[in-house]
Amino acid sequence: MRSEEEASRAIDLYADTVRRICMIHLKNYADTEDIFQTVFLKYVLHTAPFDSQEHEKAWIIRVTINACRDLLRNVFRNRTVSLDQLIEKSQELSEPGSELLEAVLSLPWKYRDVIYLHYYEGYSAPEISRILNRNVNTVYTLLTRARKLLKNRLEGVTEDA
C-alpha cells in the first residue's frame, strides 16, 4: 500500500488527466467523481513499483479508461434513465387527458409493478420474476391480466359488464 504522500503527489499530478478522460467517456460529473475515487484507490492499493513517471502515468490512464468502460458496460447503467429523460417522459404522460397514465395508476399495485418493469424498464418476465421474487408463470399471468384491465379501462368497458 502506498503512503499518503505518494497518493497526494499522484493526485496533484494526474487529477486533471483522470477527470478529462472520464468526462470524455462518461459525459457525467457524478460518474466522473466516482471513477476518480476508484482510480486513486486502486493506485493506493497497487503495490508494484513503477519503472518511471511515464510508466506510472500510463498505468493511471489505462486504469481510468478501463474503469470508465466497466461502468458503461454495467447492466444497471443500461437499464436506467437519466432524470431529465424521466421528467420529460412524465410530462408527456401527465398531459391533460392522458388516459394511459390514469389507467396504469388505477391498476392494483401488483399489476402496476409488472407493467412498469416490463414496458418502461424493458425487463423480460424471467427477469421480473427474479426481481419480485415470484414464479415466472405468475409474472406472465399478472402481465396478461394487467393488459386486459388496461384494455377494458381504456375502452371504457367496466368489469361488471
Image (tube, rainbow, N blue to C red):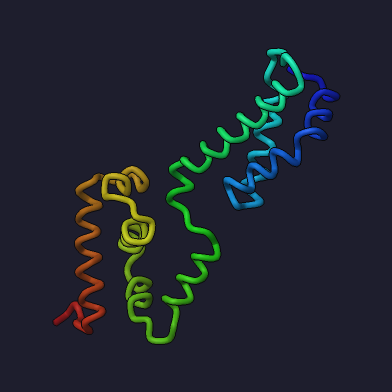
Question: Which residue appears at 37% of the width and 46% of the height?
Answer: 131
Residue 156, by quadrant, is bottom left
Question: Which residue appears at 75% of the width and 17% of the height?
Answer: 52
Residue 95, relative to residue 66: is it above or below?
Answer: below
Across and down, in percent, residue 127 comes to: 32, 45
In the image shown, does 31 or 139 lie closer to the viewer? Answer: 31
Residue 84, by quadrant, is bottom right
| Left or right of residue 52: residue 159 | left
In the image shown, does 8 or 123 lie closer to the viewer? Answer: 8
In the image shown, does 88 or 132 lie closer to the viewer? Answer: 88
Question: Which residue appears at 35% of the width and 73% of the height?
Answer: 106
Question: Which residue appears at 65% of the width and 32% of the height?
Answer: 61
Task: Kindly give the residue lying farthest to the front in the view shown.
Answer: 54
| Left or right of residue 156: residue 8 | right
In the image shown, does 85 or 27 lie closer to the viewer? Answer: 27
Across and down, in percent, residue 54 comes to: 73, 23
Task: Kindly give the residue lying farthest to the left in the view shown.
Answer: 161
